[in-house]
Amino acid sequence: MLDPARLAVSTPQAAALLARLRPAAIFTTGGYLAIPVLTAAAAMRIPTLMWEGNVMPGRSVRATARLATVLAVSFAATAERLRTDGPVYVTGTPIRDPATVDREAARERLDLPAGTRVVLVFGGSQAVARFSAAVAGALPRLVEKVSVVHVTGEEGYAGALAAREALPPQRRERYRPYPFLRDEMTAALAAADLVVGRAGSSTLAEVAAFGVPMVVVPYPHAAGHQRANASELVDAGAAVLVGDEDFDADALVAATAILDDPRRHLDMSAAARALGRPGAAAAVAELVMALAERRPLPDVAAIEALAARGAE
């Protein structure tokens, strides 16, 4: 109940901070906590860029969008849901560069068996236990046909190691569980023939940039934001959607049927790659620098081309 009063008090504090730092421009992902800074920046004529990664922006982002000088979004559909008088650019989600690792080198880095198809399974930070349960139930069937890279989270890692030891010795090398993948996530995406995961903005952006078909299991809460994100890939033919309540061991095994149909797999890969924006970080940076240097803003088409082009 005290939040409105706190926000009102925070605005002069933000103004004092900006007066001391004198930033040339401000980048924000919006939300209620951005209100004091955005309000102070507008009064001080400091240009601001707000970036939103979801198809359905949250209430707080919708409330603050008008305070930003420029908006950047991951999906074209997002622009229709934001009320603003300024320009809106479709940049995609800034991600790590997919060109930094070779597919075969990635498989060697992860010590994956040569000649096998690779399924990458990771549930993100939310409700990862459902993914671990599905992998545990499906694992003996999965390793008969594919290699599995599985990001378990800390809590699921011990169980995954036990499941690996329970496999026949000649199949254990086909299951690679990790509690987390940080720098190695780029290698895992490059190595994968199929990704099974949630529908966060960054996840979808990376999978699309690598041109990998996806079985997407949206997190069922958070006002359905992930289902809306997933629909962008599903409608384009780059992904298959499985409801969270339907995702189990049998659903996971069934999902790998995509790998048994070369034409379908190729078409999904092409659809994913067409959606990818590997140059999103460069596009966002270009907008921020244009604001900071008080240059005319780039053409919308030029930014979209930069986002789609990626590193050269």
Image: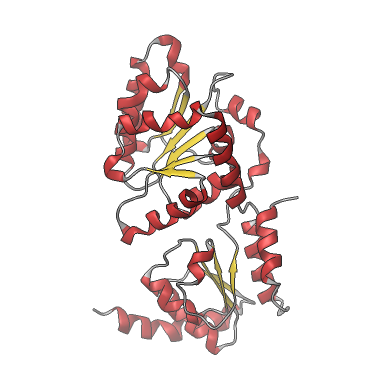
Occupied quadrant, residue 60: bottom left
Q: Is residue 148 above or below residue 299?
A: above
Viewer-nearest residue: 57 or 271: 271
Q: Quadrant of the N terminus?
A: bottom left
Would you say 109 lies left or right of 231 here?
A: right
Total residue callouts: 0
The image shows residue 63, relative to residue 100, as above or below, that is below
- Residue under the point 31% across and 38% down: 247
Place of residue 42 in the rendered image (x, y in percent of width and height, measured from the top left): 54, 86
Tell me residue 301's x, y (percent): 69, 67
Asked whether residue 183 appears in the rendered view, the answer is no
From the viewer's perspective, is residue 95 above or below residue 62? above
Residue 184's spot in the image, x, y percent? Answer: 55, 36
Q: Is residue 143 visible?
A: yes
Q: Residue furthest top?
A: 169
- Relative side of 112 to 140, left or right: right
Q: Which is more toward the observer, 24 or 160?
A: 160
